[in-house]
């Protein structure tokens, strides 16, 4: 007698994506981070105060025609605008050293092409008036991602504490290799010819942003959560790649796919939400994200050093009885 075939399990339906850029859940990080709330990591003890009347941006190094440009001349170049999420390599899993802003400025490729980049130049170095330096591959300025000398932030002049009069912003790279504030020089060098500030201090010379996700709601240790249909929600990011999927696990159960809001672009974080039937007691929720290349963030955990933290963010919370 031929045995009956075992039916294949019915796969969980993929939740329909949202049609808005926000999930509408109180407590989730705002899509755009206000300037005053945007994180800061500085090596300087005080914020440099730069006189724009005398400030110049110098384009130097392995170029045919080194030159300098004043602030007024920089503002006279057609502006480029892009939402870009910036994050710090020292951000812990679930940490808050990340923000999303609308940056206005001039593409780096425009400025260095004007100088005539020599073929042997393989690294772009950014130098600050306070001595801080970064370095990243020259090709990053030409591969299509937004990489700019920013002079504006969320429709306002770049705040002093965020690098006025100009700073570097590069999608997909951690700030320690790309985000020079109070910029005064862009130098073209070989990759081997220079190491930025953090490299001799034990951090990786390559600094691509790793795929990450974070639970914003419910808050860790919160006790006022109600039973019934409730939201677990947060943000996920994989700059220069984008997020294709976010999954949530509650109390060690099956992973459930969350609903994604519409991303602004692959260069920004995206909000997500998962609704579940909350029951009284203590619960643990975990989250993981998959980027557009199909790579899912590993469970970890790994610490931030030397090239960025890894791991699934989890929160423990209570639902009232």
Image: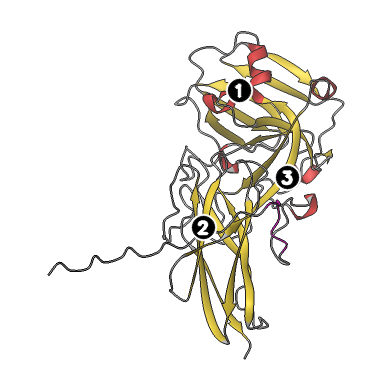
Instruction: Please state the horizontal and vertical placement of residue 297, each as a whole percent of the image.
Output: 45, 53
Residue 66 or residue 82, whichever sits in front = 82
Query: For mark 3, what is the residue?
Result: 101
- Judged left or right of residue 184, residue 318 is left
Which mark sits nearer the N-terminus, 1 or 2? Answer: 2
Residue 212 on the magenta span: no
Residue 24 visible, this angle:
yes
Say which element carries label 1.
Answer: strand
Q: How is the image coloured?
A: secondary structure
Q: Main secondary structure of the magenta part?
A: loop
Residue 62 or residue 236, whichever sits in front = 236
Which mark sits nearer the N-terminus, 3 or 2? Answer: 2
- Judged left or right of residue 250, residue 299 is left
Instruction: Please state the horizontal and vertical placement of residue 230, each as a whole percent of the image.
Output: 64, 74
Residue 20 on the magenta span: yes
Tell me which residue sits at (61%, 84%) in the image: 319
Mark pair 1, 3: CA separation: 26 Å
Query: For mark 2, what is the residue?
Result: 14
Furthest-left residue in this view? 1
Which mark sits nearer the N-terminus, 1 or 3? Answer: 3
Q: Which residues are magenta?
A: 19-24
Mark pair 3, 2: CA separation: 30 Å
């Amino acid at each position: 007698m031929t045995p009956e075939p075992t039916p294949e399990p019915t796969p969980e339906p993929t939740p329909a994506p949202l049609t808005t850029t926000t999930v509408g859940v109180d407590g989730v990080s705002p899509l755009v981070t206000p300037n005053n709330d945007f994180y800061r990591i500085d090596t300087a003890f005080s914020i440099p105060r730069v006189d724009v009347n005398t400030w110049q941006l110098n384009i130097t190094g392995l170029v045919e025609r080194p030159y300098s440009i004043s602030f007024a001349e920089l503002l006279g170049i057609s502006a480029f605008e892009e939402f870009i999420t910036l994050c710090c390599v020292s951000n812990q899993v679930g940490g808050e050293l990340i923000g999303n802003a609308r940056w206005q400025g001039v593409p780096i490729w425009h400025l260095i092409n004007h100088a005539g980049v020599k073929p042997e130049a393989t690294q772009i170095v950014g130098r600050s008036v306070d001595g801080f330096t970064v370095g990243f591959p020259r090709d990053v300025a030409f591969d299509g991602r937004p990489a700019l000398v920013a002079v504006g932030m969320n429709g306002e002049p770049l705040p002093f504490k965020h690098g006025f009069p100009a700073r570097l912003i590069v999608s997909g790279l951690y700030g320690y290799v790309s985000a020079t504030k109070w910029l005064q020089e862009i130098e073209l060098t070989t990759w081997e010819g220079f190491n930025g500030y953090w490299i001799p201090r034990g951090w990786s010379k390559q600094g691509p942003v790793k795929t990450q996700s974070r639970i914003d709601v419910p808050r860790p240790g919160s006790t006022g959560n109600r039973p019934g249909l409730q939201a677990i929600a947060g943000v996920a990011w994989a700059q220069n790649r984008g997020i294709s999927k976010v999954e949530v696990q509650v109390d060690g159960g099956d992973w459930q796919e969350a609903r994604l809001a519409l991303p602004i672009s692959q260069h920004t974080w995206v909000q997500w939400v998962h609704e579940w039937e909350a029951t009284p007691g203590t619960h643990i929720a975990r989250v993981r994200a998959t980027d557009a290349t199909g790579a899912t963030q590993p469970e970890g955990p790994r610490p931030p050093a030397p090239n960025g933290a890894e791991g699934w963010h989890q929160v423990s919370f209570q639902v009232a009885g």
